Image (cartoon, rainbow, N blue to C red):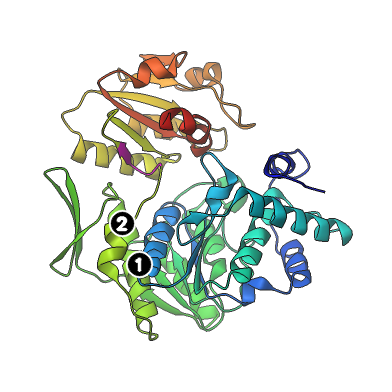
Amino acid sequence: MILNYKQAKELLTSQGKFYINLGLDRMLSVLELLGNPQEKIKVIHVAGTNGKGSVCAILANILKKSEYKTALYTSPHLAEYTERIKIDNIEISQQDFAKYVNEICEISEKNNIDLTEFEILTACAFKYFADNCVDFAVIETGMGGRYDATNVCTMPVCEIITSISLDHTDRLGDTIDKIAYEKAGIIKKNSTVIVSGDNRGTDTIKKVAKAVQAKVLFTDKNLEIKYSNGKNIAVIDNEAYDFPLLGSYQKQNLELAVKAAEFIASNGYKINLKEGLKTVKWNARLEYRKEKNIIIDGAHNPDAASELKKSLDYYFSSEKKIYIYSTINTKDYKSVAKILFKPDDEIYYIDFSYKNAVKFEEYIKNVPWLLNIKKAENLKKIINRPELKIITGSLYMIGEIYNQLND
């Protein structure tokens, strides 16, 4: 029996739960025992390679500011598991988190259902959201889509598929079409899926949608993101909106979220776009902390690194830069290094405790063209330097040092 939050965390990070096992049978079985809470809430389901979290955060805040009780389920977390499960931007309490983990684990063990960490968390989220009678739940997939633990709703309000690129190729396939097929697995019969017009997986997504008689809506807004005098502005159909999320890549994410909001509005719901965009927050995605001159961005694959590079050139072209970086071995970190770093850039590499983390010695052996890279021995000293510090790479690494950054 799990009595407290600490014990819940220990269970989730134990060897018995902390692994990946794609498939829906286990989730469907435990959710049926729980009364199928996923069918009692209005779900907006979001899949894709990059931008999922940002799209979810933007859309959830629009719905919240439109006075709907709005749930948000995302992954991974940075500092605490409770970050993943929110209602109206308020994290589930540690006490409730432990209670729901305990309930899910007791039911699964009694019925011989061997759940993974992510399956336990997903079941907790659906049950918590249903118990609290939310109006909408914005749900981010963990990996892929077709066999992802979140893919258990028979009729979501809509689906959203963000940009597709090569990531998790060991599990999802080694081509854009194969990965797009897995992501498009969230599309349900007779549903509506929202996609960016320049998504690299568009042809595959359209084929999957046609096979299940789903409607495809493409983003079509005249939209720009501008930065002037320290202020970020989204210009949508020639109207300016305050929009605090920095990054050139947020243009496509914003287009998807706005299109989804418009679709929801077309079904009779009132939408407050202006307030929703004005107050949106999303940590560790081109998050700028002016007081310490730090950028935090989880650019963990080549496409994300390319977007980070473009954003740094746009917002901070004249700044001297110091990079603080780390990665895991399932990522194409050699390509990331070639995209993001110049050979003589000052780079500090962080060794962190995640099981798939690449150690400093292994990293420098595989990227020998980086000439000025050192192991980060004193993070506080580096952070206190006046130059622009870019903390990037694995979100797991960022999560480990996030509390230090907050302190």
**What span is in magenta?**
284-288
Q: How many marks?
A: 2
In what element is the residue under mark 1?
helix
N-terminal label among 2 and 1: 1
The residue at the point 75 percent across, 72 percent down is 32
Checking the image for residue 65, the label placed there is: 1
Q: Position of residue 191 (x, y in %)?
A: 50, 80
Task: Locate residue 264: give its quadrant.
Answer: bottom left
Q: CA distance from mark 2 to mark 1?
A: 9 Å
- Asked if 212 appears above or below 61 in the picture, the reply is below
Tell me the crowding category of disc 1: few under 14, some 14 to 19, or many 20 or more residues within 10 angstroms, Cα based: many
Q: Is residue 218 left or right of residue 214?
A: left
Residue 36: % across, % down: 70, 73
How far from the left and from the top, in percent, is residue 127?
66, 66
**Labels 2 and 1 touching (C-beta < 8 A):** yes
Q: Residue 103 at what x, y percent from top left?
A: 76, 58
Please say whether residue 329 is visible from this viewpoint. yes
- Magenta region includes residue 312: no
As drawn, the label of residue 279 is 2
Residue 196 relative to residue 233: left or right: right
Quadrant of the drawing holding the C terminus: top left
In the foreground, 365 or 159 = 159
Neighbourhood count class around disc 2 (C-alpha, 10 Å): few under 14, some 14–19, many 20 upward: some
The residue positioned 72% from the left and 63% from the top of the image is 27
| Residue 195 visible somewhere in the drawing | no
Amino acid beneath label 1: Lys
Asked if residue 137 lies left or right of residue 51, the reply is right
Residue found 26% across the figure and 58% down from its top: 278
Q: Main secondary structure of the magenta part?
A: loop
The amino acid marked with disc number 2 is Thr
